[in-house]
Image (spheres, helix red, strand yellow):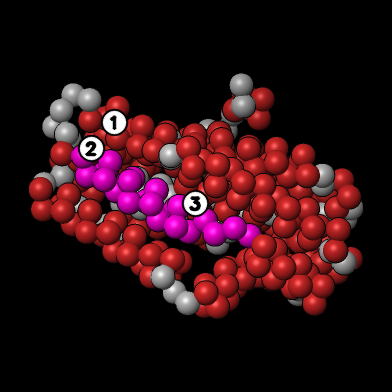
Amino acid sequence: MKLIWNIDRRSLARRAAAVCGLALLAGCSLTRFGYERLDWVARWQAGRYVSLTQQQETVFDDRFAEFWDWHRREELPLWIDELRTLAAQADDTRRVTRQKLAQMSERYGRSMQRMAQRLAPVACEVGPQLSDEQTEELLDAVDERIDEFRRERVEAAPEDRRKAAIDAIEKPLRRWLGRITDEQQAIIRDWQDRRPAVSPAWLAYRKAWRSELAATLKTRSAPDFCARATRLITDGSVLWTEDQRAIFTADREHWLDLFDALLPTLGEDQQRHVRRRLLGLAQDFEAVLPGHATAGRAQPAEPAAAQRS
């Protein structure tokens, strides 16, 4: 279950870094269309890891509906505010300091952790219902993704890894900027060439996480299963070794270096482009807030102050 069991700290960190510089959701394809169908997306993602019985699907849907309603009430307004704040600064990127980038990253990271905490009850309720065959299926799916990561990020030829890494940066930037200049491409390539390798450390971490997951699933009938599963879901960093923690912390600073270097190079057309994208996404999300006329799952709206108290 990708949204329940396989919380990938690497991808969250990368998204948080991308968010800092140019957009709150630079590493994500969520739009109003996607957000309104988040329950279907969640079920589809879960199905990539384990086949649920009808009873388990009912539990999953009920618990996920509670999570989704909470997110629309509590988290989505914060995302909208962040998007509008970034849009207001898009015309003068000098105001987006490195300190502000780091603060945005921290806020986004806290949002991701709150989401994980709210999703944990899904695992707590569905986990004990899993059969031995289902847990084996789940672990096999995790193994497949670890093996895919190993082949593509660790064992691939250096030039292939470099090209894939650069493409992973430039693709979302083109969505937000429209066009990347030769100067910006040179910055990205130079940054990637200077970036210390982190994939081997992530591979080791993911293997350790998988081992802990297997051990936790073996206790799914025990009273402490929920506590163990919640810990694994909400704070996988507790499994980091000291060396891994140092590598991942340094990599976060390296990502900040990239956006710190890119922001001053944005031209007027790029600034207008990213501002339109940010405002458009904020408007899309506002349309699915509780109480909005077009919200697919409307609930009585609370005043903004009450929602954030």
User: Which class describes the residues within 10 Å of circle 3: few (<14), some (14-19), or many (20+)?
Assistant: some
Task: Report whether 54 appears left or right of 198.
Answer: left
Q: CA distance from mark 3 to mark 1?
A: 21 Å
Q: Are marks 1 and 2 in contact (CB under 8 Å)?
A: yes
Disc number placed over residue 216 in the picture, else none: 2
Which residue type carries mark 1? Arg
| In the image, residue 186 above or below residue 258 | below
Disc number placed over residue 214 in the picture, else none: none
Percent across and percent down for residue 121 are: 32, 33
Residues rendered magenta in the picture: 195-216
Q: CA distance from mark 3 to mark 2?
A: 21 Å
Q: Which residue is mark 1?
A: 228
Percent across and percent down for residue 245 are: 51, 40
Task: Report whether 222 appears left or right of 255.
Answer: left
Quadrant of the rendered image containing residue 150: bottom left
Which residue type carries mark 2? Thr
Q: Residue at x 84, y 64 (%)?
A: 266
> Residue 157 colored magenta?
no
Q: Residue at x 78, y 53 (%)?
A: 260
| In the image, residue 273 above or below residue 219 | below
Helix, strand or loop for disc 2: helix
In the image, 22 versus 14, the foreground residue is 14
Check the picture and name the quadrant holding the C terminus. Answer: top right
